[in-house]
Amino acid sequence: MTRRRFRFPWRPRQRIAVEVDDELAFHLEARTAEYQRLGLTAERAAARARQEFGDLERARRYCLEQDLASERRLRWTDRLSDLASDLRIAARRVRRHPALLALSVGTLAVGIAAATAFWTVVHQLVLNPFPFSGGDRAVAVYHSLEKSDVRLTPRLGAVALWRQHATSFEALEPIEHGSAVMVGSDGSELVGIRRVTGTLFNRLGISPVVGRALSLDDQDPGAPPVAVLGHAFWQRRFGADPTVTGRTMVLDSTRYTIVGVAPREAERLPGAWRRGHDVFVPLPEPGDARISAFTLAWLRPGVTLAQARSEMAVLDGRLASLDESFTRYATRLYSGRDLAGPRNTRTLLILLGAVSLLLVIAGANVAHLQLGRDLARLPEHAMRSALGARRSQLISQGLLESLLVGLAGGVLGLLLAGPLLRFLVESRPPALDALANVRLEPVAVAVSLGLGLGLALAAGLIPAWQAARAAPAALLHGTWATEHRGGRRLRELLLVAEVSISLVLLVGAGLVARSLWKLGSLPLGLEPDGLVTAAVEVPAWRYPGAETQEAFLRQVSEAVSALPGVLHASRASGVPPQTGITFGALEIAGRTLGEAETESFFASQSVLPDYFLAAGIPILEGRSFDPRGTSGEPNVIIVSRALARRYWPGGGAVGQRIRIGSEGPWQEIVGVAEDVPALGLGELRGALHLYSPHSGRADENVLVVRTTMSADRFELRVRELLRTLDPAVPVQRVASLPALLEESTSTERFSSWLLGGFAGFATLLFAGGLFGVLSQAVALRTREIGVRVALGADPGRVRRLIVRQGLRPALLGVVVGLAGSWFAGRLLAALLHEISPRDGLTFAAAALLTVLVSVVAAWLPARRASRLEPVRALRAD
Amino acid sequence: MPVDLPSGSVDILLLKALSWGPMHGYAASNWIRARSGGALLLEDAALYQGLHRLERLGQVESEWGTSENNRRARFYRLTPAGRRRLRSETETWRDVAQALFRVLDARSADS
């Protein structure tokens, strides 16, 4: 234990100098006296002493310097120990109100945990999805249709042209996605193949954990086939075996030698759609220019995104003569920020916004609690102030307590953020699958603690300042409760803020929930129950030529029909909500369409004639396709009701001829099928639907089966069946229609749950805040209430008085909240379908709920107030 | 004959002097002279510089008090850190001195 000696208060420089002089003077006098005793005269003694001393000036300067340094160090030690004791005192004071502490810390912690978790998600998915070297200069290059969100990956031919002509890029890396069948002992599996250049890993700044990366030589078309395993695939299929290099694997009948394993960071390469980055193989160079690949480009240093974009626009024109894809599409560059897809980005940002609002409420509530505590301490402050405490001391003490609360809240929030993030990752919707790789980063620590301290400071500053302003006399007399208007106004303001924010969150959650409900009650157009789909991936190397593939598929669907429990089996090229897309301008024979009428974007499927029967889609007019022959009738088409109604409102679409694009044969409409509105909520929403007859080219490899079996059971049977027919053919994506439909709204459901949770928490917070404020108001005004009752006010009136006092900020908050929701409605539009962001019913319901909650929150304090006995109340103080 | 002292040794002498109890600079100066039989003449300027330096290092602490003849004087005393340093440096000096003498006392070129 360090002993603190009694010291004078901090010595100024003047004083230190004087002390040094005194000390040296003492020495000289003593030495002089000694020499005098030995017989010298006063002057001789003094001179001798002086001379014997040495360099007096130098000594004086040196000692002064040393003393100043000592003084500085002591001041620092003093300051630190003062701070330490202040903190100890603050901690003691804070601990004295455990309920208050728990509530403050808990509120802060929940808010901070949510904010940290979401900020991490947004940061990693939206702001920084390219966590690779030079990632901030990386962009994704797409070809897109003029007026739609749909983007296509560019062809390799286009990439080569950009390499030659574009000056904005210092590198272009195409990553071709594909899949291949890997035959193993337990059946065959479809693995995700990424064909990449030998320079990709270098460019990304990653190196393999085992073996080597691909090289430029491997890209030579004649080079022996090599592969680099993806990290997760290596762990899953090869048991993370470090001796895996040199082993071989067979993908689609080609034998590849494994040369290395990619690091975990490679999983975060963008573009991992349904299947992960299982295996990296070389992209042949020179290769087929028609293959399209997801392309990343790195901007040259000094080139901005805007400059690159304008260069792309210019090149689109110039290169049109060299590659036809430039005539049809416009080149678009997406920075990491836009890569998550506009819908996902908006969803995440909306959620982040909601979390921020929640944080504000949490902060406001903590401010309430602090205010309340300070209000209760006013007499003490007044006393101390009267005894000489400086205002800055009172304020700093209050602030220190707030900081401790903030620190505790931040730490707890950080601890909670981890599990919360894991929960988010576990329950992520498929569209946000990239969430799987989101991890808590060290920056999160800074975020949490910063938020905690910042909020607490903000929350504690105003009350502390307020408290210090209290006039001692009024406080000591106990009349401050009625006189202290300023504090009341502040608390009301805080309450108004809380209520309004909570209302905005309630409206948001309500809108999303209603939107979901409306989606769910849309007519589906097909019969989802009992409908199961499965994709059969017929490998070309085993069944060369379309005829053999088609024959095999026919064999499969016949065998499936024969399974017990299967009512009907058909095939199609895809199934809602995952149909294909067709673009091109619609043309109608014998009619010219104006600009506004031309649709260029369609959902399309090629189907077998009995598809409609199997799927339960009624044919409203005309007929389904003709079942004769191995391939369907030529040049016929079936359209959806919306299309028919749009162009032939009075009916009579059957027999008309249409085509997509201005070349090619006219297709005769032979039938009109019911709409399937639940076509997924992405780009295909609201698209018109076209059905082509089956092509005979084995395009229809998705089984559409109506069965009484459950999807799992069906999966087992189908896999069994395929194993007996041909074990090298994998079955993928077995799913029931209800499950697929649910999946298509999964993002909305995810957001709905989260927003609902936020709104609920916010409501709880403001209710608690209101309850606290009113309780304290009642406690403070006990005397006044006693007087009123003594003067004849009945309990009902007292109750109403208190409730009115509580309702005033609540109602004001509702008004402000409704206005805010009105203006902010547009922001929510990305998540809403079938419902307007200004839906009156939702607004009204949210407002009503808020008022109700306020009344309930005010009820208990009001009741307590009405039950006060006047005598006790008057005596209380 | 007075010997010039290397600077590190000022500190150790002061620490030793103060190990007998708190004293002011004048007393310390006299003690060192007496103890070394007049052989070590420590310049007073250096002594006071040493004292102040030791205080900055935290190895001594000072306090104003009254001297034997009722004059105001600055008294110094060892801190625990100073005591520790005294202990360890005494050992070091002893070792150095012994080694030095082993070299200096060598009777022949290779003993």
Image: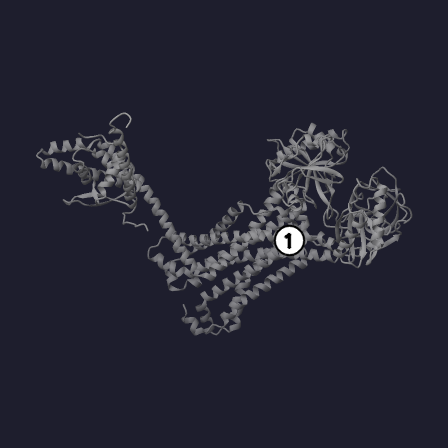
Name the side, left or right, on which A625 lies relative to A778.
Answer: right
Local packing at callout 1 (Cα closer than 10 Å; few below 14, some 14-19, many 20+) is some
Instruction: Assign the C terminus of chain A to one quadrant of the image.
Output: bottom left
Q: Quadrant of residue A752?
A: bottom right
Residue A677: x and y, percent?
77, 52
Along the line of sight, which residue is nearer the eye, A378 or A575?
Answer: A575
Q: Quadrant of residue B60?
A: top left
| Residue B106 vertical position relative to residue A716 in the rendered view, above or below | above
Name the side, left or right, on which B43 lies relative to A267.
Answer: left
Name the side, left or right, on which A347 lies relative to B73.
Answer: right
Residue lying farthest to the right in this orientation: A628
Residue A473: x and y, percent?
36, 60
Residue A381: x and y, percent?
38, 58
Q: Quadrant of residue A142?
A: top right
Residue A531: x and y, percent?
79, 55
Total of numbered circles in the picture? Answer: 1
* Viewer can see residue A611: no
Name the side, left or right, on which A682 lies relative to A867.
Answer: right
Residue lying farthest to the top in this orientation: B109
Return the residue at label 1.
A427
